[in-house]
Image: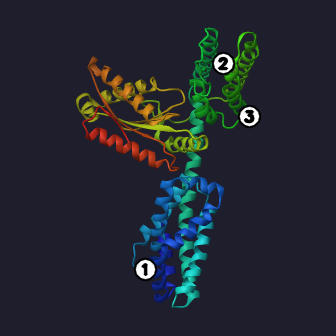
Amino acid sequence: MFSFYANEWRRLLLGFDTESSAVLAQIAQTHNQVLAEHFYSAMLEDEAASGLLSHEQVQSRLMGSMRRWIVQVLSAQVDDDLGALVAHQVKIGEVHARIDVPVHLVLRGARSLKEGLRAVLRQEAATDYAEAMQMAATLIDHAMEAMSQGYAISRDRNARTTEAYRLFSVTQNLATVREQRRAELLDWENQCLYLHAMGAGNQPLSSLSTSDFGLWFRHKGVDIFNGAPATQSILDAIEQIDSHLLPALMQAKGADVGLPLLQLREQSRHIAMNLESLFTQNSELDAGRDVLTQLLNRKFLPVVLSKEVAYARKHASTFSIVSIDIDHFKRINDQHGHEGGDMVLQQVALTLSNNIRGGDYLFRLGGEEFLMLLVDTPATGAASVAEKLRAHIEREVFHLPQNERRNITISAGVASFDGHPDYQRILRESDEALYRAKNEGRNRVVSA
């Protein structure tokens, strides 16, 4: 693909005279700020785009990137490395797909850019205005074509992975999951009733949305059941309970307790009935997962991160990532063989799984690397969770072949969502924090 677009770019450049090329390059060098503003002003008129581009760091970084892009595209020469230039366009398209910037908005920005360029050329071009403008429009359109190719490939890949993840979600032993969620819902209801019956003063009752059941349903159940009507019914019931019934129950005294208490139990039963219906409608399907640890495969990481970024932006919430690495894992493989290494990986995966909530996510990225995504969790909470896990694993005795045992440690890097729409940012921050933890002596947690 790169060679085709590079050869086509070279052919297009050869079709214009050198004088027009020189004028265009000069205009790009001297007026890239104004032209970049033309591009983004058109995009920001769209409500969806303004939401995506409102983040301060996005604006500051994108403006600089756009100025460089204008210079690169309009100053390109036949002898340049056009393959690298095409690869850059494809990568930009992939980023647009990742943060969900629609293609039509990018094309609108390109049209505005050409209008701004036309005005500048009329004012300053000493050569034939029409020839230079035609050259500019041709090069911009070709760059956009390569960019759109990257966007389309990325969107198609993401769509396939998203569906694979949904199928993966419903393959996780639904009978077991069903019983766990039933128990969590019942535990929450019983806890509320117990605290209220014991007269827990002004202590607020725990909201259903932040309970183990609520976290699981909002962050995982919605995907498993893929937009079934009963899904929204459960979400509405959770909202009704948290926003109206719990406050009413807290304020009620004496005989007035009866009505909100009855309504609370009715809504809880309504949720349980809808949940049972959803589980009944979904049968288990075959799908791949990490064979050794049974954790989520890293191919699902973009899907989950994109979903959590969208959720956090929509609900003004946050989430955190903990990147985890087993310290000196190579020594374990060298001393105890790959069988010993596999046993350690399985035990670490089990320990991590047993110490996170139902709504959280746990991935094995490959080798000795794991990643946890903690929903509705700010930086301080994530660091606390990571430190407890680090201490827990440090105390744990790990079993190896021939009845041998040993202690191991982990290093962890923590990063939290800061509103940036590109999930690669939080991944880089957690990786950098993990790198620091390892460089500073291992067996520690470092926050970005």
The residue under label 2 is 250
> Pointer 1: what residue?
78
Secondary structure beneath label 3? helix
Left or right side of 137 for 399: left
Question: Residue 173 location, x and y as percent?
Answer: 57, 25
- Gap in Å between the C-alphas at discs 1 and 2? 74 Å
> Is residue 406 toward the left or the right of residue 51 in the image?
left
Q: Residue furthest bottom?
A: 127
Q: From mark 2 to mark 3, how far is it between C-alphas?
A: 31 Å
At numbered mark 1, what does the secondary structure look like: helix, strand or loop? Answer: loop
Q: Which residue is mark 3?
A: 229
Label 2 sits on what residue type?
A: Met
> In this orientation, which residue lies closer to the viewer: 3 or 183?
183
Residue at 52% over, 39% down? 318
Please determine whether, in this image, residue 116 is positioned above or below residue 207.
below
Verify CB contact (< 8 Å) between mark 1 and mark 2. no
**C-alpha span from label 1 to label 3:** 57 Å
Q: Which mark is residue 100?
A: none
N-terminal of the pair, mark 1 or mark 2, is 1
Place residue 266 in its image quadrant.
top right
The x and y percentages for residue 328 are 26, 34
Whichever of labels 2 and 3 marks the residue nearer the N terminus, that label is 3
Q: Is residue 417 above or below residue 361?
A: below
- Identify the amino acid type marked 1: Val
Looking at the image, is 298 positioned above or below residue 61?
A: above
